[in-house]
Image: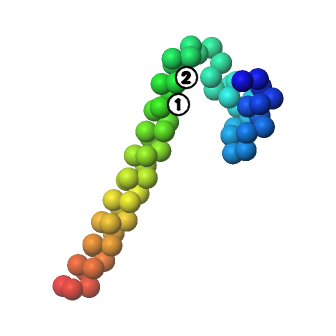
Amino acid sequence: MSASDVCRKPGDSTFYKRRSRYSGMEISEARKLKGLDEENCKLKTLLADSMLDVSTLKEMLGNNF
């Protein structure tokens, strides 16, 4: 992809942000970093869901006792 194609994608970071983040990396390292970022996002979502469940259970048990 050319730089102009990358910059035109909606919801994607700008060329300069990508260049500052990925400059000097090999392609495999950049792919690994991107995969780790996606996994981190999924884990954060799971943590938030579990914290919400715990909070709800505490509230329900607190009212009964």
Left or right of residue 12, residue 30 in this image: left
* Amino acid found under the numbered disc labelled 2: Ala
Q: Is residue 37 left or right of residue 11?
A: left
Residue drawn at the location 50% of the way across and 36% of the way down: 37
Q: How many marks on residues?
A: 2
Residue drawn at x 48%, y 24% is 32
Compare residues 64 and 2 and report the one nearer the observer. 2
The answer to whether residue 2 is above or below residue 24 is below
Q: Are marks 2 and 1 in contact (CB under 8 Å)?
A: yes
**In front: 7, or 20?**
7
Q: Dot 1 corresponds to which residue? A: 34
For badge 1, the amino acid type reads: Lys
1 or 32: nearer the viewer:
1
Looking at the rendered structure, which numbered label has been put on residue 30?
A: 2
Location of residue 65 (image quadrant): bottom left
SS at circle 2: helix
**Residue at 62% in and 22% down:** 22
